[in-house]
Image (cartoon, rainbow, N blue to C red):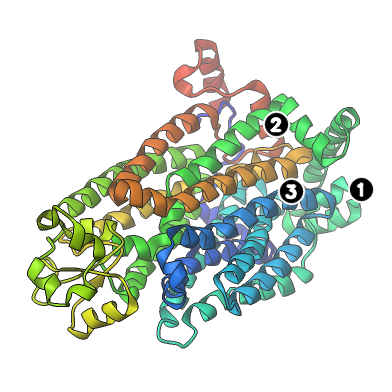
Amino acid sequence: MVEGGVATADRTEFTECWRTVWKTPYIMRLALSAGIGGLLFGYDTGVISGALLYIREDFEEVDRKTWLQETIVSMAVAGAIFGAAFGGYINDRWGRRVAILGADLVFFFGAVVMAGAPKPWVIVIGRIFVGLGVGMASMTAPLYISEASPARIRGALVSTNGFLITGGQFLAYLINLGFTKVPGTWRWMLGVAGVPAVVQFVLMLSLPESPRWLYRKNRVDEARAILEKIYPAHEVENELNALKFSVEAEKADEAAIGEGMIAKVKGAFKNKVVRRGLYAGITVQVAQQFVGINTVMYYAPTIVQFAGFASNSVALTLSLITAGLNAIGSIVSMCFVDRYGRRRLMIISMIGIIFFLVILSVVFIEASNHAPKVSGIETAHFGTNSTCPHYLTASDATRWSCMTCLKADCGFCANADSEIHPGACLDSTKAIKGDCRAEKRVFFEKGCPSKFGFLAVVLLGLYIISYSPGMGTVPWIVNSEIYPLRYRGVGGGIAAVSNWCSNLIVSESYLSLTEALGAGGTFFLFAGISTISLTFIYFLVPETKGLQFEEVEKLLEDGYKPRLFRGKKEKSKDQVESA
């Protein structure tokens, strides 16, 4: 048996999922409709990376201020923190379906505000509203899917939400690329985000509430009617009996701790089972962010520019490739998550992430060390008024390289003959950029021309391939199934808030970190944090593959230990259960 201490009821593979939904297409209809919430999440993550390039061109203050760029990106994350917290309350009070409908309305409003923003601060307000919708959807969609899915294919169906997240990111990069030559570029990029919200709103109007939530509200006949559409006739009574057992236990707990949200949060941390579930759920959500993935998603074109590709369209094209790899990785996860298990996929994923982050850091450091030199002759060619002010007053100007120039908040105009030959260090204004480009030269502001640029992009792709099948989708699956029914909304909300708080820290600090440590140092920092995260996952996260919710509860009640740290009696018990 897999590590986790409980024998699984069924060794379901991805093909079983397709066999089941082929016989019962209603299940896939539920999963895909709710999964559009993941598409919203993914589109918002991906679209801002490309839109930011053009927002910087339209608003000079954004181009000049790193903190303002970080704020535009991260305010959606800040909104998502409150959206996830509020979403947990709405889920328990009014149901999963109502939470998804509310998320669509808020998201659509935010998209309209961003598209029409006359000033950067209006974009920030729109980002907050979009974040509220994303936060509500991010924790509700996998919850709704998991509660409307048979246990044997639950992982694969919840993975559809992960696939739609990565699919949304790919779609965002594709749309970004399509609007690069259209007047209003970034306004179209951000405004189109409202379309999937409208589509999901219409689809969810025709779908039912989660059968588990309905049963909890004593709407047993409605719950039975939905279960009859999901399960074979001979399994419906067993599922109803399982729900009855969970609800009775829930009511017993509520009698002891109360029904309010605050009481539930306090009760969650007092309850041994829920507390252990939160240890695992929060661990995987925080780890998902601190591997640095959303720096890649939010700033992918900028990172590509760090690697030496100055053109916006080239940066977007290469970013599209990384987004495509992320989407493919989600399909791989759907194929293997119910075959090999959640825990194993995450551990393998983390090992790959750490390896490629270390190699990436080395490549970026080498690229920085071998950056082209600044030529006094090339710089003088553009005149003293165009020269970087810091370069003019530097005592060591003869030792300046492209990286030194960029760190002085100036730009590097590449040599006309070859980008890797010594170039000019110029002031970074629109007029001077135009003068450089008028001579068919490339103007670098974020990164320097390098022989290592293509290798850096390849390694970035390999990092995403390592991330997507495991840490990309599995944390959401774990959180959709590790909490008892009575605490599922609260537990999922707490874990989602931890995810978004971690996301906020990473996205708000990334550009500042690259200024302080360089791209190489920042990736190395992520590698160190990822190593710590892998240790926590190994010791705290059990395997939940193929288990009924009640079996997961029993697993947590008994306590989890990795196989290497179990006593002989526990190992013997595992062997008996596996037989």
Name the element at disc 1. loop
Residue placed most toward the observer, 575 or 535: 535
- What residue is shown at x 17% (from left), y 84% (from top)? 439
- The residues tagged by marks 1 and 3 sit, at their Cα atoms, a distance apart of 20 Å
User: Viewer-nearest of labels 1 and 2?
Assistant: 2
Residue placed most toward the observer, 60 or 170: 60
Q: Earlier in the sequence, mark 1 or mark 2?
A: 1
Three-letter amino acid code at disc 1? Asn
- Give the image quarter of residue 264: top right
Name the element at disc 2. helix
- The residues tagged by marks 3 and 2 sit, at their Cα atoms, a distance apart of 15 Å
Q: Earlier in the sequence, mark 3 or mark 2?
A: 3
- What residue is shown at x 62% (from left), y 49% (from top)? 154
Three-letter amino acid code at disc 2? Val
Q: Are marks 3 and 2 in contact (CB under 8 Å)?
A: no
Indicate whether 207 appears above or below 528: below
Q: Quadrant of the C terminus?
A: top right
The residue to which callout 1 is attached is 218
Residue placed most toward the observer, 42 or 411: 411
**Which numbered dot is residue 88?**
3
